[in-house]
Amino acid sequence: MKTYKKIDYTNLLTYFILSLGVIIVIFPYVSMVSTALKLPPETMAYPPYIIPKNPTVDNFVMVFKKVPFARFFINSFIVSATCLLVSLFFCSLAGFAFAKYRFPGRNILFLAILAKLMIPIHVQLIPLFKIVVALKVADTLFAVMLPSFISAFGIFLMRQTIAQIPNELLDAARVDGLGEFAVFLRIILPLSRTPLITLAIIFFVWKWGEFLWPLIVLSSLDKMTLPLGLVIFQNRYYIEYGPTMAAALMTILPVLMLFFVLQRKVTESLALSGLKG
Amino acid sequence: MSIFGYGYWRKFVRRNRETLTAYVFLLPTIIFFGSIIYFPIAYSFFFSFFEGSVIGERRFVGLDNYFYLFKDRLFRQSMLNTFYFTAFIVILEVVISLGVALLLNRERIKFGNFFKMVYFIPVVSSLIAVALLWKWMYEPRFGFFNYVLSFIGIRPRAWLLSENTAMSAVILTIVWKNVGLYIIIFLAGLKGISKMYKEAASVDGATEWQVAKYITLPLLKPVTFLVITFAMIRGWLVFPEVYVMTEGGPVNSTRVMVFEIWEKGFLFFKMGIACAESYVLFSVILLITFIQRKLLKE
Amino acid sequence: MRNKIREGTIGLLIVLIMWVISVPMVSAEKVTLKVWEFGGQESYNQLAGEIVEEWNVENPQIRVDSEFLTGGTWEHYNAKVTTALAAGVGPDIFWGEDTYSAQLAHEGFLSSAPDYLVDYLKENMFSKGVFDSLATEGVVRGIPGSVMWLGTFYNKDMYREIGLDPEMPPRTWTELKNYAEKLTLFDSNGDMIRSGISMRFTGHGMGIADKWSPFLFAAGGSFLNEDATKAAVNSDAGIRALQLYVDIIWKLRADDPLVPHDAPAFAQKQTAMISSRGPWVIGYVETNAPEIDFGVCPIPRDDVTMGTGSGGGVVEVWRVNIEAPKEAWQFLYWLAQPEQAKRLLVSRGSLPPYKFLIDDPSYTSPQMQAFLAQENIIGRVLHWKAYEIYSIVGGYIQQVCYRKMKAKEALDAAAIEIDKLLKES
């Protein structure tokens, strides 16, 4: 290993590029906060400036007044959390089946599941909505959750990672008298903690930000989720940017904070999720 | 042993224990996919041979819808646009994320976690929020994008309003949002490459570039393939950003396939054609994924 | 095996419990009318809510539940309504854009107005064009919820600035072009900082064609021929009307694709005129830029024909679901009575569809009078596929304004597509 005594230019360059990346990522958020704190004459000022001259929280107030935004938060949370729990359970179960069992039809079934990833959701929209109506659950949070209870991507990822668990562990457990489902609960799940966390984050974020399906399936204001609230200030003629940015900010913040809290786990889990193809 | 005997069934279960267990585990998945995923998909496929909206008169037209598509300029434009979109998005995302991952992976670079975390922020931000944010940033007069660019001497442009720049602008937003995820995936892959290879190479006198080029990158192929496939599929299915930021314009320059499907199905009530378009899209994605798989197997 | 079954059942139970928690409580049935409205301003929503309550008090056996779907664009709202109807859970009464919901009518989702209501409307509406917008294929299917047609807006301060008489707005296309050219401002780099006039050629095709239509009509043109069997938009009148746009943008450089447009631009003083917009702009400017002294004038006339024809804007129609109880029409009949209509329509910023509203004090301002001075309103629902027809034409208009095609070429192409469309239906 060489040691340098003079200035390491490549390192400097690297840091420079990386910092540039940070600025590129952070700056839009700064402008979002800045706009959220401004009222109309300032939001349309030219040239634009970052620090508002008359900062105000009116936009945030407006958002809460116009729609039950707090309710949207709760709804989004219920939907995202439930979907993620259900999905994690069934995806790992299915992943386990695909990874550790041999059975006729395995490959075809797996392909059928993967194929789903390539289909645009619009194709499913109307028939799916009809199903929801037939089940008499239209305009409920359950209907919003329904299409996301099991994820093809989740099954794919779990299969990848579970495949790497050594069979000896499983056989040992079986010899000890554990039933298959117990093997699943007591061996597989604990060992899959890291990919499960990865999926948890992905599912939560995805469901939190979902727009189209909730739009179609919900009509009562008190059942709506956050993204639907984002477009309240976009009417048929123009967009009111101040309140829209305030709403956007409030949509992003919770997930962001959750992310900061869990971030070490996330990066670790992604590293260990065995993405080796 | 009679087929109705309890003994027969016990033997059956014992012999096929593995298969049965697997299927029991898969039962919820099969039911779910069957009813919630595949039934609607099959229904739509069936519908692509008809004309009309979902309720009301429906005429069987066989392959007419598909023939219509090949003559329709909007469909062709949408296909082309989607192709360009996907190609640029994938290339940019892969190159940038791979590059940054390589940089972050360097020996002497500290604060790795900090950088990773920051880059991941757009990934966890809600898509619609991001689209609205960038729509705001691209505003010609009071948007920050032009303002910042003016410091580097670039004249203000109406990014979303000019057909030459609209696509690039939307691509930029999408890449900005997704790059963080791929950086982390690549980093994970990089960490999996044994340090020994790199050390051996540098002892032999190879520079960092050479190590990267001849050792790291080839070993990273499976991960790269995964990222490309994933990014590609997401590229083909782009919709909310376009819908919020440009509505397919100007002059159809950002009109992508899913937008086209949306318009035909939900605005013009031509569900049959919308379904046909979805299946063409699906077939293309399938085809390209297969081709890609073949190519990378080499 | 037994272990597994037990643990499996527990898992299943958990899921079921979660399911049960979120299933809504089914309310008892009575004659309830579900109404969906595409919400407007706060004040309107509140007033509408009060009016609904008045009905509920007077008519306890027919309860009306009204929901205001605020926010989002027309496309959001339309998609919602469509999907709900397609699945059979649509509202009983809903607010629909005239052209889009004409498609719904054709698909059989809407019921037709009873004779007493049709007679009432015929008697009390003063504009045939607006009345026609309520009907699809000859059958009336709603009452007017809000009516707008278009007028030309101009900034009087800017007129004074360059020496134009603010009380003499443009009356012909020549004057329009002339003034627009003079009102445009460039900076030292040659960039346009203020457009002389703001025309609509971006966004969805439907809106573009809609804002262009008064010019088409002023030139004596129309989208379709007399019995709506063939396209007529590529007539000389149509080409002239489109050429107007082209001249303003590219010959006179009074508008540009790259500058801000529409009401926000007008309020920010970045444009001196709006070529065609509805009366809602009046309220918008008064709220957001009260210092601007502005006026409205009827759409200028084509010099060649000196014809007047206005139209465009949108007629929002109260539609009734085909599956709704008859009582729904009773409610709408009540809404169309002078007392309710007056309050609702004025609060919405609508123009008066009914004769008994014309003398209402809310319409006496000079700006409103400019709207009312346009007599020959042409409805948009020329065919049940009007939405798509407008979208096609709008798409081509955009091509021309972005210099991808020439006016005649574009309109001919549009005509071909429209003819194909008409044949299919």
Image: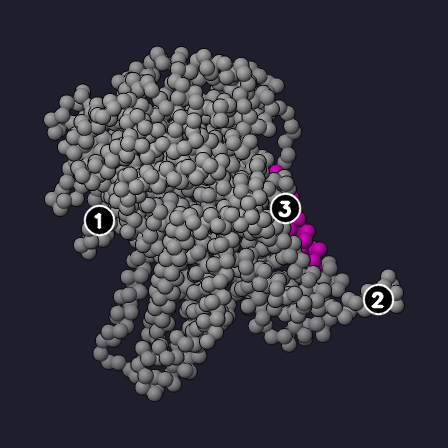
User: A176 and B82: which one is in front?
Assistant: B82
Q: Amino acid at mark 1?
A: Pro
Q: Is residue C116 above or below residue C262?
A: above
**Looking at the rendered structure, which numbered label has been put on residue B77?**
none
Give yes or no for contact between labels 2 and 3 (Cβ–Cβ under 8 Å): no
**Looking at the rendered structure, which numbered label has been put on residue C19?**
3
The residue tagged with tag 1: helix, strand or loop?
loop
Q: Position of residue B239 (x, y in %)?
A: 43, 49
Same chain for mark 2 and mark 1? The answer is: yes
> Dot 1 surroundings within 10 Å: few (below 14), some, or many (20 or more)?
some
Q: CA distance from mark 3 to mark 1?
A: 53 Å
The answer to which image quadrant residue C252 occupies is: top left
The answer to which image quadrant residue B60 occupies is: top right
In the rendered image, which residue does mark 1 sit on?
A: B156
User: What's the residue at 55%, 68% (across, down)?
Assistant: A161
Q: Amino acid at mark 3?
A: Trp
Numbered circles on residues, count? 3
Does residue B207 appear to the left or right of C113 in the view shown?
left
Give yes or no for contact between labels 2 and 1 (Cβ–Cβ under 8 Å): no
The residue tagged with tag 3: helix, strand or loop?
helix
> Dot 3 surroundings within 10 Å: few (below 14), some, or many (20 or more)?
some
Q: Position of residue C422 (x, y in %)?
A: 45, 35
Same chain for mark 3 and mark 1? The answer is: no
Residue C16 forms part of the magenta stretch: yes
User: B194 and B36: which one is in front?
Assistant: B36
Q: Position of residue C118 (x, y in %)?
A: 50, 17
In the rendered image, which residue does mark 2 sit on?
A: B8
Of all chains, the one bearing label 3 is C
User: What's the residue at 62%, 62% (across, down)?
Assistant: A109
Q: Is residue B180 above or below residue C361?
A: below
The residue tagged with tag 2: helix, strand or loop?
helix
Q: Quadrant of the N terminus of chain A?
A: bottom left
